[in-house]
Amino acid sequence: MSLENHLAALEQRHDALDKEIEKALVHPASDELKLAELKRRKLQLKDEIAKLRGDPTLPTLH
C-alpha cells in the first residue's frame, strides 16, 4: 500500500470516527466511556496522519 493510499485510509477512518462521535453527542444517554474511547482513537489517527505527513510540530518521544 502506498503512503498516499495509507493516508487516505487513515483520513477516512478519522472522518468515520468524527461522525460516530457527533452521533454519540446528540444522544444524551450515550456511554461516556465509549465516547472517551472514540475520541482517543480519533486523536491517535490524527497523530499518525500528522506523523506520516512529516508534521514538525509533533513531539518526538525518546
Image (tube, rainbow, N blue to C red):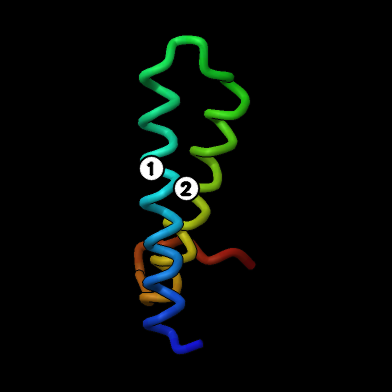
Whole-percent x and y of residue 7?
40, 73
Upstream in the sequence, badge 2 or badge 1? Answer: 1
Seen as rendered, the residue at the extreme bottom is 2
Q: Secondary structure at mark 2?
A: helix
User: CA gap, disc 2 to disc 1?
Assistant: 7 Å
The residue under label 1 is which amino acid type? Asp
**Residue carrying label 2:** 42
Whole-percent x and y of residue 49?
42, 66
Q: Image check: 60 left or right of 54? A: right
**Residue carrying label 1:** 18
The quarter of the displayed image where residue 3 is located = bottom left
Tell me if label 2 and label 1 are in contact, CB under 8 Å: yes
Whole-percent x and y of residue 26?
36, 19
Q: Nearer the viewer, residue 60 or 43?
A: 43
Seen as rendered, the residue at the extreme top is 28
Callout 2 crowding tier (Cα within 10 Å): few <14, some 14–19, many ≥20 = many
Nearer the observer: mark 2 or 1; the answer is 1
